[in-house]
Image (cartoon, rainbow, N blue to C red):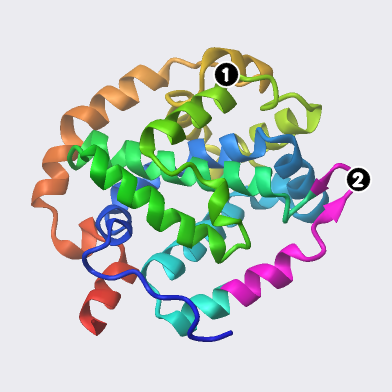
Amino acid sequence: MAGDFIPFGPNSMMWRINCERVVLLAGPAAAVLQVAHPQVAMGVAAHSKFRTDSIGRLHRTLEVVYSVAFGTSEEVERVRDGVARAHRPVRGEGYSAFDQDAQLWVLATLIVGSVNMYQRFVGKLTVPELDRFLEENSRFGEVFELDPGMLPKSWGSFERYYEEMLNGPLLGSHPICTEVANAVIKPEAPWFIRACSPVFRAMTIEYLPPPLRERLRIDSGDLTGILWSALDRFLPLLIRFAPENLRYAPQYLHARKMR
């Protein structure tokens, strides 16, 4: 029902973290980690053009994230309705878009990705701030019909859940995970997008433990260390002096004007 969702505001951790464009660097790793979950990979494989539209899927995911993070209650309700319609047919033998464990994992990859990028390039976050961000994300997850009780209540508990998932047997355990994950990194797309695949792979590898990387058959490559060393050296300085329209997400700048 319209108006049920209480929007996040300027003092929220959701605004503080997601306003930074640099968190988008987590996108490739989050996308690969999501489809490493067999249920997610099966749903993506059966109900999307994942070989040719993996970039489009990532873009749509980001649009949804920004709409919920910075939107009004009416805008968020429209997103909720749209996502529910899109997810309704995504079900089959062994998978469902409404499976709570799979939904929790998808949300967890977004949380970890944004926190990692923020702390790496913008600034450190305290444990109480991380706990607040986690609590806000339980509200975020409700928009997609995730039971808020599924998300751990403390950052320490959340980290334990995430590490258990990364190092456990589930991720990458079905052959479709490998197929979809590699399509994310190297999609069937115009040459200028395919040319970026070594960069996408390097950005992904940083946050994949070696056993999972091996299961997904993702080569390490030579660019990883060079890329991240360059980013670590130059990005914090660029962020500090970048004009607002380059540093911040346009959805955040619009929401800031409106409130």
Examine the rendered structure and indicate whether residue 79 appears above or below residue 33.
below
Q: Which residue is mark 2?
A: 93
Seen from this angle, which residue lies furthest left? 241
Left or right of 257, for residue 30: right
Residue type at numbered disc 2: Glu
* Quarter placement of the C terminus: bottom left
Left or right of 229, for residue 151: right
Residue type at numbered disc 1: Asn
Instruction: Out of 144 and 52, give the one closest to the viewer.
Output: 144
- Residue 93 counted in the magenta span: yes
Q: Tell me the distance, in whole angstroms, between the alpha carbons under discs 2 and 1.
A: 26 Å
Give me the residue at 83% from left, 50% from top.
Answer: 46
- Magenta-tinted stretch: 80-95
Q: Are marks 2 and 1 in contact (CB under 8 Å)?
A: no
Q: Which residue is mark 1?
A: 167
Q: What is the quadrant of residue 125 in the picture? A: top left
- Residue 60 location (% of width, % of height): 56, 61
- Residue 109 counted in the magenta span: no
Instruction: Out of 241 and 42, give the one closest to the viewer.
Output: 42
Give me the residue at 54% from left, 79% from top.
Answer: 77
Give me the residue at 59% from left, 46% from top.
Answer: 104
- Could you tell which of marks 2 and 1 lies nearer the N-terminus? 2
Left or right of 28, for residue 182: right
- Residue 107 location (% of width, % of height): 53, 48
Q: Is residue 201 visible?
A: no
Task: Name the secondary structure under disc 1.
Answer: helix
Seen from this angle, which residue lies furthest right? 93
- Residue 251 location (% of width, % of height): 34, 70
- Residue 238 location (% of width, % of height): 15, 44
